[in-house]
Amino acid sequence: MREQFLTSCKRIVIKIGSSLVASPKGGLRLDRIERLAKELGALQSQNLEIVIVSSGAIVAGISHLALDSYPHELPLQQASAAVGQSRLMRAYETAFEATHHKIAQILLTHQDLADRRRFLNARHTLTTLLQLKVIPIINENDTVAIDEIRFGDNDTLAGQVAHVVDADLLVILSDVDGLYTQDPHLHPSAELIPFVPVITPAIEESAGTSRTQNSRGGMITKIRAAKQAGRFGVSTLLLNGETPLALQQVLDGQKGGTLFLPQESSLTSRKQWIAFTLRPKGELRLDGGAVQALTLRGKSLLPSGIVKVTGTFMPGDPVTCATEEGKSFAQGLTNYSSETLQRILGKKTSEIRTLLGSLEYEEIIHRDNLVLTGS
């Protein structure tokens, strides 16, 4: 089943980790970039559609600026990214030109995908580039991103990009062979796990943290990216990018790496966007009757079922729905601001009309803008 699926993939998002293409002391690893360009260009020549999400700009900038270590201050990270991004893209441009393949640079922040119009614009641009046989190379726009609008790491960005382009497969290339039963650097007897049908809490807890300070990621971010991509119906392959031709061999049906299966989902792309791309700006605690109406009867959320409002938000913003005990179970787009909801929560329609003078919407969250997300 694993081999049959991998050999059938046509549109693939490939995330390339920082350690593969750059080091703080040595700068860009041009020989590695040239090899990856040759291998990925060959895949495109086999009529596969390739989208690259590449880290490495900050690390390349660190080397060029001769900084002593990976910067923790955001302005210094942004400065390093500004210096390193152009050098990284120049290296990719040179490498892909040698293989007669065209590339395009796209820089994104989370805000670009949180806005539905910009999300769709990004989708149209990327699919058009693929139709033109151009390989998009995507990175987070670190020079302007702040905590509120950044993805946090390129594993997360790659998972979101897989949704944007409706990918068949997300490949995360790093310096590890895949997911092991234990950290292989600490436990030589650890065994590679070739297939993960479900990402359980135990798998997430065992992932640990990053072993290096040269990136914002680590095994845990790769597991979370696979989980995120799985919500969008996209499988994820974790593979060692230091091994020549590793991806080509796996796509040809050979063994290698760890494949994470996606969840089965009947959600439309828009509802996936509401549930898994948007970041909630507030929380609505609901009574038992409202919880049942939303979860069991597919109803919209009315003011009478709300018992508590937290956060500051405006009409159209995403909010979390939770039980009175605080267990989250849904996310949706609110028709009212937090200020207005504080005035009308728990009240019936007739009382609200008297209180506000009018009632633009009867529903706080219409069922078409509501997605059940589980715990």
Image (cartoon, rainbow, N blue to C red):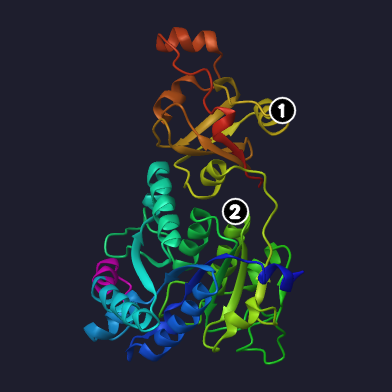
Compared across the picture, whether 194 is left or right of 18 comes to right
Classify 155 as above or below 275.
below
Cβ atoms at labels 2 and 1 below 8 Å apart:
no
Compared across the picture, whether 83 is left or right of 354 comes to left
Q: To which residue does mark 2 refer?
A: 232
Q: Quadrant of the N terminus?
A: bottom right
Q: To which residue does mark 1 refer?
A: 297
Residue type pointed to by label 2:
Phe
| Magenta segment | 70-81
- Residue 95 lies, in percent from the top left, at 36, 83
Neighbourhood count class around disc 1 (C-alpha, 10 Å): few under 14, some 14–19, many 20 upward: few
Seen at 70% across and 67% down, the residue is 5
Report if residue 33 lies within the magenta region.
Answer: no
- In terms of image quadrants, where is residue 96? bottom left
Classify 155 as above or below 90.
above
- Residue 154 lies, in percent from the top left, at 45, 67
Of the numbered discs in the image, which one, if any, rests on residue 165?
A: none
Seen at 44% across and 52% down, the residue is 123
- In terms of image quadrants, where is residue 126? bottom left
